[in-house]
Amino acid sequence: MDNKTLSRDGTPIAHHRTGQGPVVVLVSGAMSTGATTAPLAAALSGRFSTVVYDRRGRGASGDTAPYAVEREVEDLAALIEAEGGEAALYGVSSGGALALRAAAAGLPVRQVAVYEPPYAVGEDGAQERAAYTRDLTAALARDRRGDAVELFLRLTGLAPEMIANARQSPMWAGMEAIAPTLAHDDAVMGGGPVPRELLASVPVPVLAVAGGASPGWLRVVAQQVAQLVPQGTYRTLEGQTHAVEPEVLAPVLAEFFAGA
């Protein structure tokens, strides 16, 4: 990351800007850094100034204790101020939930686009998320970072044999390094269910996108988000999964951010 901006509590937030045009800040999801959204930033940079950043506790950014979701909203406020004072936001997965929180908090945001924010669906989904929060809290309290990562991977639906293979892979150490931030994302999700009151207070246009090849509940959630915000639009990207391809997503985002 080329630059660091101090958030309100003094935490340094690392970020990188590329391209020219209206500013778009890309917000990554769980177990990821700004590098995760860099390919999408490159795909948008022909028409927009795209900003990728390491959320607090990840990559080159700091992580001042105690954590609160409000601190991550302040991180976005500091980035937007540093990059010109106004921006559109794109958030993937739990990063989408954070982007929506930032807009609802009154940050100078023009538009918000989200890809598959993983709010819980139904009573079963709420119970599963509550159990995850309980077990994650216990694992991190004992500094059992590998167990925390495994809990998250199980929540995403990854098969046990794939998790076992992941534990033996070179990437596992990096995942354990940022495992404490899983608690950050869990807090951002607010307990799981779709936050109806919060969404109703989002004052800007929102585009909610889901992949046609993703689990059906993720499409249901994205549709609910589009319905609950005052100015919402829903799009399905056929053939796409939760790991959406940047070259497929970028034209859809560009059309929305250009105001078409």
Image: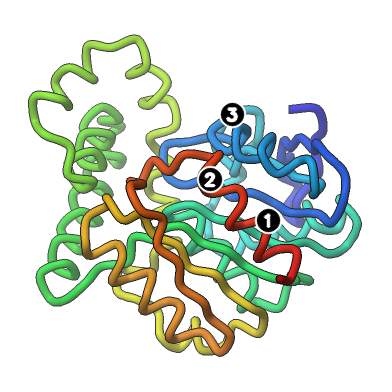
The residue pinned by badge 3 equals 59
**Which one is closest to the eye, mark 1 or mark 2?**
1
Reading the image, the residue beneath label 2 is 28
* Amino acid residing under circle 3: Gly
Marks 3, 2: nearer the viewer: 2
Give the residue type at disc 2.
Ser
* Label pair 3/2, CB-CB below 8 angstroms: no
> Which mark is first along the chain, 1 or 3?
3
Residue pictured at 27% horizontal, 52% vertical: 214
Characterize the local packing of mark 3: few (<14), some (14-19) or many (20 or more) Cα atoms within 10 angstroms. Answer: some
When asked about the image quadrant of residue 30, the answer is top left
C-alpha distance separating marks 3 and 1: 27 Å
Q: Which residue is mark 1?
A: 254
Considering the numbered disc 3 on the image, is that residue within a helix, a strand or a loop?
Answer: loop
Q: Residue shown at 64%/36% (left/top)?
A: 62
Residue 93 x, y percent position in the rendering: 42, 53
Q: Quadrant of the C terminus?
A: bottom right
Q: Taking 230 as reference, is 137 left or right?
A: left
Tell me where residue 105 sits by quadrant.
bottom right
For residue 220, side relative to residue 50 (left or right) = left
Q: Is residue 158 left or right of residue 49?
A: left
